[in-house]
Amino acid sequence: MLRNWWMAGLMLVVGVLAARSAANPVVGAVEFLVFVVVAVLFSPLAFPRSLPAAEARERSARDGRPVVYWRPGCRYCLRLRLRLGRRAGRAHWVNIWRDPDGAAAVRAVTGGDETVPTVVLRDEAVVNPEPAWLRDRLPS
């Protein structure tokens, strides 16, 4: 779990250092806020609640929703998440850094590496899909 937050923590530390070194306090405050926003975007907070892989697969089998395997700090995962907007909650999200079974599922699909985002829907798996592709497959 600690590994999930390292980048967010690093962004906050850099933000504090940038703010402290700014000549103008207003500029320092703005710089700090920019780093706070970046920290939140690269943390698990920007994503729907992560499920264990087994639970996500079970729910997907019942409701037909896709399973999205992701990890914090992945810019492609963030891009997918942001482009889905409110629809992101219509998929089951699995953080592969938090769930070894999820990481193994991704390695099985990608030939041994942990390339994310990887989306699995029924028997179809797509690595780094276009957001429109996933949006078209989300339930209304």
Image (cartoon, rainbow, N blue to C red):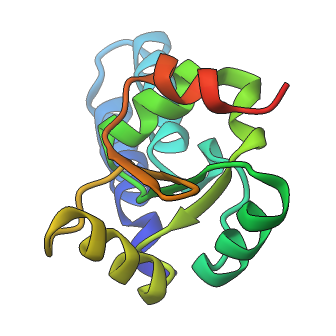
> How far across and down, in percent of the image, does residue 20 sit?
35, 36
Specify whether residue 27 is in view.
yes
The residue lying at 29 percent from left, 66 percent from top is 109
Q: Residue at x 67, y 22 (%)?
A: 85
| Number of numbered discs overlaid on the protein picture | 0
Residue 113 higher or lower than 54, as above or below: above
| Left or right of 18 in this view: 70 | right
Q: Quadrant of residue 38?
A: top left
Q: Nearer the viewer, residue 44 or 130?
A: 130
Name the image quarter holding residue 7. bottom left
Q: Residue furthest front?
A: 123
* Figure quadrant of the C terminus: top right
Instruction: Give how far across and how far down residue 70 sits, in percent.
Output: 44, 56
x, y percent for residue 31: 40, 22
Which of these two is toward me, 96 or 118? 118
Residue 38 seen in render? no
Q: Is residue 54 above or below residue 51?
A: below
Q: Residue furthest bottom?
A: 100
Q: Residue at x 21, y 63 (%)?
A: 110
Looking at the picture, how far across and down is residue 128, in whole percent? 31, 39
